[in-house]
Amino acid sequence: MDLQASQRDLREELDRFVRAEGEPAAVRREIVSSWQRCITAGLHPDRLEVPYQPDVDDRGQLSWAAGPVIDRMAEDIEGSGIGLLLTDERGHVIDRTAGESTILRSLDRIELAPGFLYSEERVGTNAIGTAIAQHTPCVVTGYEHFVDALTRMACTASPIADPTGRLIGVIDLTCLADDFSPLMLPLVKRAAWDIGQRLGEGAAGVDLQDRQARMVPPGWSSLTATERTVAKFVAEGLTNREVGARMLVSPHTIDFHLRRIFRKLGVRSRVELARVIELAASKARIVAAADEARRRIERDLHDGLQQRLVSLGLEVRLAEASVPTQDQELKQELARIVEGLMDVLDNLREISRGIHPAILSERGLGPAIRALARRSPVPVELDTRLGDRFPDPVEIGAYYVVSEALANVAKHAKAKLIRVSVDLRHGFLAVSIQDDGVGGADANGSGLTGLAERVEALGGTMQLVSPPGSGTVIHVELPIEAA
């Protein structure tokens, strides 16, 4: 369409076209073709009737392949006025997420939500339906929509093909027309390509646990902040309508979130969901209690036994100094006793550090991790960009992630270098440990399993990538506010 043509001109072009008064001259060819298909299907611009089919295939191959791509894109559009949708090959909406609540309400008004069918022959020209009809990526903005009710919106969509080239779905970005950006088109095209690649890997029988970054373990930690809020409200016994009223979204939106929550947590009822939430809270309480016990033991060792050993060492040294010079045998025996006491003290300090590092409580996460790096037998490149102190559970969790990872590298990886980075990103403490060793780390090993359980109890996520021969990367994100 001519970029100078006004929205009013577009509507006048459509009105003349509907009345068969000639083909529009200032409208893009693909839009004109879509308008023609809408007229042939018997649609009317003043009517929006969106079919609803509640049976959504949200556990099929398409949802599996699209899941990680949608999760990544959801992070990219967080806080924006953009909605992200996945449909099957008929335009039946399977999944939906949005950057903020305003666009969710706009999508609800036009019934662009899971379960609704957005094929071109049912709702007129729109990016989802038109992309399916023409088998190519599509952009529809404002008054290019055939139906009046959609003219406030802008959308861009790209078809998703399986390894044989068969169209099996569509990925779509939708926003208010005033918020449209041309960059939305390359985003959906890239997403469709990524989903297609995952479909190809699945069809080829590739072990995705080796090829993809794995979430360890799946469950509560995989939920978004919005999904956790929905889950907690639902577990308290609120209906979808009541939860929607509290969160200022429609019951359809809550139902969509609930289906994703059930899928991620592997539950099938609200009762099971309540049990999972209570289990997550119980794990967090157990970790907190264990950390407090560690802290108390370390304090008792430091203030009690360690101080007593230091005092004994000083007393023996004073006794050694008072022995006459000619009694060398006694002086040497006392010196050996002092040396033995100091060895015991060093061992006790090492044990105390393992129970709970005093430097973490006294000086914070940055100095504590630098101390770990200095003690590592494998050289460590450290990048810490930390400012203020963080809540104790977060600092303790991050510390033990780094400590366990460094110990594993020293024992098993045969690495020459370890890179550790710790920084704050969008309300999460991000910790990454990468080595150049032999790879092939076992996510089910006791050390990594223990770390994953601690991270999950804190509401965080842990990813492990360790292809044989190419080193290992552990990436952990711990939420600051939840702590």
Image (cartoon, rainbow, N blue to C red):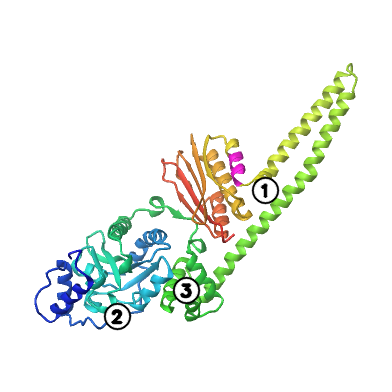
- Which residue bears the numbered disc 2? 50
Kind of residue sitting beneath label 1: Ser
In the displayed structure, does residue 140 sit left or right of residue 368? Answer: left
Q: Which residues are magenta?
A: 365-372
Looking at numbered disc 3 in the image, what kind of residue is underneath it?
Arg
Label ID, residue 177 = none
Q: Distance from label 3 to label 2 (Cα)? A: 28 Å
- From the viewer's perspective, is the residue at label 1 or at label 3 nearer? 1
State how far apart marks 1 and 3 are (Cα). Answer: 42 Å
To which residue does mark 1 refer? 361
Q: Residue at the left extreme?
A: 22
Per the image, label 2 sits on a secondary structure element best described as loop
* Distance from Cα at disc 2 to Cα at disc 1: 59 Å
The percent coordinates of residue 283 (x first, y second) are 60, 62
Tag 3 residue? 268
Q: Quadrant of residue 23?
A: bottom left
Query: Residue at point 45% right, 66% down?
Result: 264
**The N terminus is located in which quarter?**
bottom left
Q: Secondary structure at mark 1?
A: helix
The answer to whether residue 89 is visible is: no
In this view of the protein, can residue 482 be seen by the observer?
yes
Please say if 173 is above or below 396.
Answer: below
Q: Position of residue 17 (x, y in %)?
A: 13, 77
Q: Quick check: 45 above or below 406?
A: below
Q: Is residue 133 magenta?
A: no
In the displayed structure, 396 sits above or below 177; it is above
